[in-house]
Amino acid sequence: MTEPITFPDGFVWGTATAAYQIEGAATEDGRGASIWDTFSHTPGAVRDGDTGDVACDHYHRYREDVGLMRELGIGAYRFSLAWPRLQPQGRGPLHPGGVGFYDRLLDELHAAGIRPWVTLYHWDLPQALEDAGGWPERDTALRFAEYAAAVHERFADRIPDWTTLNEPWCSAFLGYASGVHAPGRRDPAASLRAAHHLLLGHGLAVEAMRSTRPDLRYGITLNLYPTVAASADPADAEAARRVDGQSNRLFLDPLLAGRYPADVLADLEPIAGTAHIRDGDEKQIAVPLDVLGVNYYTRHVVRGGKPDEDFERDASWVLAPDVEKVRTGAPRTEMGWEIHPDGLYDTLVRVSRDYDAPPLFVTENGAAFADVVDADGRVRDQQRIDFLDGHFRAAARAIADGVDLRGYFVWSLMDNFEWAWGYARRFGLVHVDYATQQRTPKDSARWFAGVARANGITG
């Protein structure tokens, strides 16, 4: 029997998804092409040639999916709006086809008593904007702010919680440096300019939205990683500094402290310079936040370059190209990510301690395992239950130690298109048979429903 834990009254329990990963209907009702449509149709870009053309067919099955959430007692649903569904060319008036879909989804959520928590950008940049240069160009930040203002004007009376960006680190460095995500470019200098323009777009968007509805909540979601030197060797400490700089402080410092960290700017100078950071940009990025979303999956244990069989490099670390990840021997998920619940505690405490942070929410946490439906129609995913149990307990410990954590969204509601992995990795609480679109709640879904209803783990 495990030790019972209880979360504060009013703690928000939810699940999360993203538009391109679940919606499908890629060419219906006026939707334009996104960078992920183009990338996934590029031979060799996505495992097994998978695309999000159909995905989980949520566009047509949203009522069923909201019904599943209601049955599981989920109180909040974090989902993204598809920019190319609402502005097919990335600019101009909102398209009635996209507006109609999200109106219907919101109707269903409100009827079910589920709080909508919207992300404006979860990586599906309209292809027309990428053709004009994408996030490395300052104009894309301006287009994003216009998009945010238009969507907010249409839906502000129905959505209380607004997140601008999901994981700008991924958009910038997986998309423009390593090229493993859309748009698939490998240009370190462009990736650093993209990171800045993503943050600038965030600041402009929040300012535009708050100017008309200051009563609503506005924030951003970052993927953060505790970064640990593999040893006391000064080379390993330097490796950790550089990775932490790019992974965490490049985003946390301008957002919460109003300036980029000096050491990171020094690292950035020989790669991309700093001319793209104009006077006033840092002040714009640092608009006050009502919430900060933290996505946590794993930690980084790193060292200076000492190649042997026990290391791996990350091509997205443009400020630390020679740094190596150390495999610690700890259990890993199907994604190859070390399972380390204490890293969530460390991350939450670090943000709370080192910054004047707004209330925090864990906006993503979950794991991919090799789930199968048994002959009796059941998915026995005890590994996921154990994973979530450990991370929930780490979150509760952070709260007990003074962190203002107010909610937790599990990734993901259902199995879906896992970006460059296609359909080969399953993160969902609900199993999806992609051939039939049959939804099967896993054991973890029913366990999570019990946690949400009890507002804690009863034992």
Image: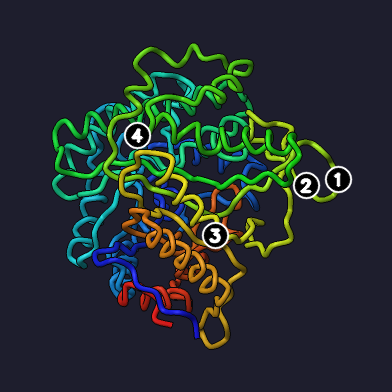
Q: Secondary structure at mark 4?
A: loop
Q: Position of residue 256 (x, y in %)?
A: 37, 34
Q: Which mark is on residue 62?
A: none
Q: Which residue is mark 1?
A: 308
Amino acid under disc 2: Phe
Q: Secondary structure at mark 3?
A: helix
Q: CA distance from mark 4 to mark 3?
A: 42 Å
Picture quarter containing residue 358? top left
Amino acid under disc 3: Asp
Identified at 69% across, 62% down, the residue is 330
Pick the residue in front: 442 or 432.
442
Amino acid under disc 4: Pro
Q: Are marks 1 and 2 in contact (CB under 8 Å)?
A: yes
Which is closer to the viewer, label 3 or label 1?
A: 3
Q: Position of residue 396 (x, y in %)?
A: 41, 65
Q: CA distance from mark 3 to mark 1?
A: 27 Å
